[in-house]
Image (cartoon, rainbow, N blue to C red):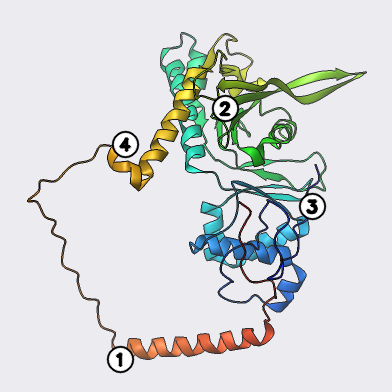
Amino acid sequence: MSVPALPAKPSSSSKPESDTTPPSSFVHPPLTPPPTDEKKAFPQVERLVRLFKSRRDGRPVLEGPWTRIQLAVSEYEELERRLRRDEGLGGYVEDKVRYDYIPRSGQLILRMPSKLHDRFIGGVAEDIRAQLEEISNGSADSAAAEFARKVKDMRTGRVILLSDDPDVRPSRHEPDASFQHPGAQFPGVVLEVSYSQKRKDLARLADDYILDSDGSVRVVVGLDLEYRDSRRATLSVWRAGIVTNGEKEELMAIPTIRDEIFRNEHGNPTSSPGLQLQLRDFAHPEMTAALPSDISITVSASQLCLALSDAEEYINTEDPSNRSQAAGRHVLGPRVGKRRREETPPDKLTAEDEARMAELEEQADKRQKLKDEDFKPDSGESSFSSKG
């Protein structure tokens, strides 16, 4: 699927024409202007850098949980260079920003999942982890027990996938959850939660994970939530498989379950068997060939619904208007007050400190003046809001 490049920034009289928010769409302009040559040569990179700075500084950013941005490989490499040069911003992006980059299509995808999304996938991963622990403690097969003990819940661990074309750089993904054995280069099981923006990309993600890992990723699970008009939720599963095409055999991401409803529009579990995995799914075949084929891990429709309901309940208790009713809390007696520690007055600056600060401020003013002479804000720098 082709994705158009982001439109140029609109003038104050225009509105964005797409529901996908371009990375230039934030409320406040950048604190300092970029060098003129970089801004002209890599405008898309400059917009992304401004977006990252806005998120780091806690300023409002208009973006959804799954935002596609067209970014050529040369632009992505420039973005990496800029983040390496700015260690503070680079460290923030490395630790706090989740994104995928697919060189094949020249797309960077910003992930900003909701708290509900994270709570739900955390509950599903916990069910899988608990069953792995049961196998590690109770399986009569010592090889199966040892294997299960070593499989780790990687959650949002980064997955780097190599291309068959040596001229194409590796792709980068940060799945919502994954399970990996330390002896394997790739996770065996990957889980992704989707809403409307991400739903159409799940099959492509399954292709990327399975094909670009040469089938080392054995299973990709898609959990799709609907919240605007329904409480319905569905399950999709893709598995690595070899199919015959004429005289050739081809590796494919084979859809074994497609949009199977596990929670109906009223929020109740259906008769779906839920997510069914085998212990062998958690690493590539060379590692699991000796494992029994009858050891399964199942997250039933009822368990999936419970994980989703628990996530919804937790999010509701975070709302201050609901907290006193939905969640218990300690109640102080009517005569009990609160005593805080006295504030310690800040240390006074010495004359030497004040002189040094004045020198630094003067140097900063001079640098800013030189930059301002080269920088002219675009006419479209004014803020705008996304469609409702």
The reply to whether residue 84 is in sight is no
Residue tagged by mark 1? Answer: 351
Please report contact status of discs 1 and 4: CB closer than 8 Å, yes or no. no
Locate residue 166, reporting x and y percent: 81, 45
Nearer mark to the viewer, of 1 and 3 = 3
Disc 1 residue crowd, few under 14, some 14–19, many 20+, Cα 10 Å? few
**Residue 1 occupies which quadrant of the picture?**
top right
- For the residues labelled 1 and 4, the Cα–Cα distance comes to 55 Å
* Amino acid identity at mark 1: Ala
The answer to whether 173 is drawn above or below residue 63 in the figure is: above
The label on residue 326 is 4
Nearer mark to the viewer, of 1 and 4 = 4
Disc 2 residue crowd, few under 14, some 14–19, many 20+, Cα 10 Å? many
Relative placement, left or right, of 233 versus 37 is: left
The label on residue 233 is 2
The label on residue 4 is 3
Dot 3 or dot 4: first in sequence order is 3
Nearer mark to the viewer, of 1 and 2 = 2
Dot 4 or dot 2: first in sequence order is 2
At horizontal 41% and vertical 30% (from top left) the residue drawn is 310
SS assignment at label 2: strand
SS assignment at label 3: loop
- For the residues labelled 3 and 4, the Cα–Cα distance comes to 45 Å
Dot 1 or dot 4: first in sequence order is 4
Locate residue 371, reporting x and y percent: 63, 84
